[in-house]
Image (cartoon, rainbow, N blue to C red):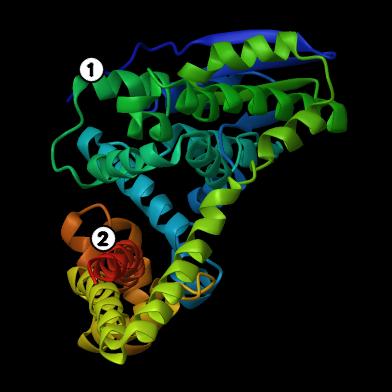
Amino acid sequence: MPPESAPQEPLATLTVEGSEITLLGTAHVSRASAEQVRMLLSGDDFDAVAVELCPSRHHALVNPDALSRMDLLRVVREGKAAMVTASLALGAYQQRLAEQFGIEPGAEMRAAVDCAREAHLPVLLIDREVGTTLRRVYRNVPWWRRLNLLSGLLASVLSKEEVSEAEVERLKEGDVLETTFSQFADREQELYEPLVDERDRYMAARLRAEIRASAHPRILAVVGAGHLKGIARYLAEDRGDPDALIRELDHLPPPSRWPRLLPWIIVALVVVGFAIGFARSPDLGWTLVADWVLINGGLSALGALLAAGHPVTVIAAFLAAPLTSLNPTVGAGMVTAAVEGWLRRPRVGDFSRLRHDTTRLSGWWRNRVARTLLVFLFSTLGSAAGTYLAGFRIFGRLAGG
């Protein structure tokens, strides 16, 4: 087991608009961090405790059984399946770290929350929503590099190797989000900004907003050690309206117009291809339709099969994908996830074991909730690939004919 961090975690104290803020930089793989949180809150007279948590992460921390009450079909209908899957993947990575080092995930944040409650102190959630951060990361990189991010996330989650010493050092400085994308974050400005710098500014702005709203005389802020200097700098430098800055950093930049138009353009081209084919001869037209159904439906069905979907789900993927691909507002994954969830209704135990099961590769296929999410993702990816491949096939036949 790697050595513990030094007994004393980094501290910085500064005065902001008449309030004293003590920033405690924590190491996320060190018991010493949780111990120092307890020591500071038992020995000093603080009026509030701020933590590097967003509302959803705080909810997961204090309500570990929240996943057992998740409405899976509603998640799919609202288009949140991919985000829930990413959150589970990040949680699985954190759990793997906890098992390797023999610590509780988020022990120092839990200690801060628990001690604040015992002392009847308000808990200030100052980090940006993890979903917003992930979306800003996704939007901040060119579309052709997003696959690298997804593969990096999957590699971090599914790897059976123990965390390396280099990753341990990163965790002592940053957090799970930064470490998950560690192979990119240091050298890529597009990732550093939303993962680190923006969150430094966000947490500094949240602290200033809380001071203006409630005028807490003394605040203990428990943050990752890698955020301490950035937060301190922005607390000292920023003089503008913190609420305006928070709104700016919470804003999701609009996606480029052409990725939204591309599916409709492809549909139009495919329909035009069908029309040209039937105009030349009915046999050619039906051949093009068969290509579309076999390639699009076949790849979507293959995705459902790789996710270990029910045989009826696989058939549904084959039948639905060629139709849903002609209507970009409805994805094949929505159909397959609904069918899989109806045929293999997740049990209470699946929800209660979800966070634990997803720490192992086999658990994603064994747990009915996780498997339904995989059915959604894999059948969607299969249908997307099938749309492009079938399109090329159709116009190849037309060009050759």
Q: Residue at x 52, y 34 (%)?
A: 140
Cβ atoms under marks 1 and 2 closer than 8 Å: no
Name the spot of residue 215 as percent of width and height, x first.
85, 26
Name the spot of residue 129 as percent of width and height, x first.
59, 43
Which is nearer the eye, 129 or 133? 133
Q: Secondary structure at mark 2?
A: helix
Which quadrant holds residue 395? bottom left
Dot 1: within a 10 Å radius of its alpha carbon, few (fewer than 14), some, or many (20 or more) residues?
few
Which quadrant holds residue 387? bottom left
Which is nearer the eye, 83 or 297? 297
Looking at the picture, which amino acid does disc 1 mark?
Pro
Residue identified by numbered label 2: 357
Residue 341 visible, this orientation: no
Name the spot of residue 81 as percent of width and height, x first.
45, 64
Name the spot of residue 401 as percent of width and height, x first.
24, 72
Q: Quadrant of the N terminus?
A: top left
In the rendered view, tell whether residue 258 sits above or below residue 208.
below
Looking at the picture, which amino acid does disc 2 mark?
Asp
Side (left or right) of 126 relative to 397: right
Q: Secondary structure at mark 1?
A: loop
Residue reaching furthest left?
161
Q: Residue at x 36, y 69 (%)?
A: 376
Residue 81 visible, this orientation: yes
In the rendered view, tell whether residue 186 sits above or below residue 194.
above
Side (left or right) of 36 relative to 168: right
Which is nearer the eye, 311 or 262? 262
Residue identified by numbered label 1: 3
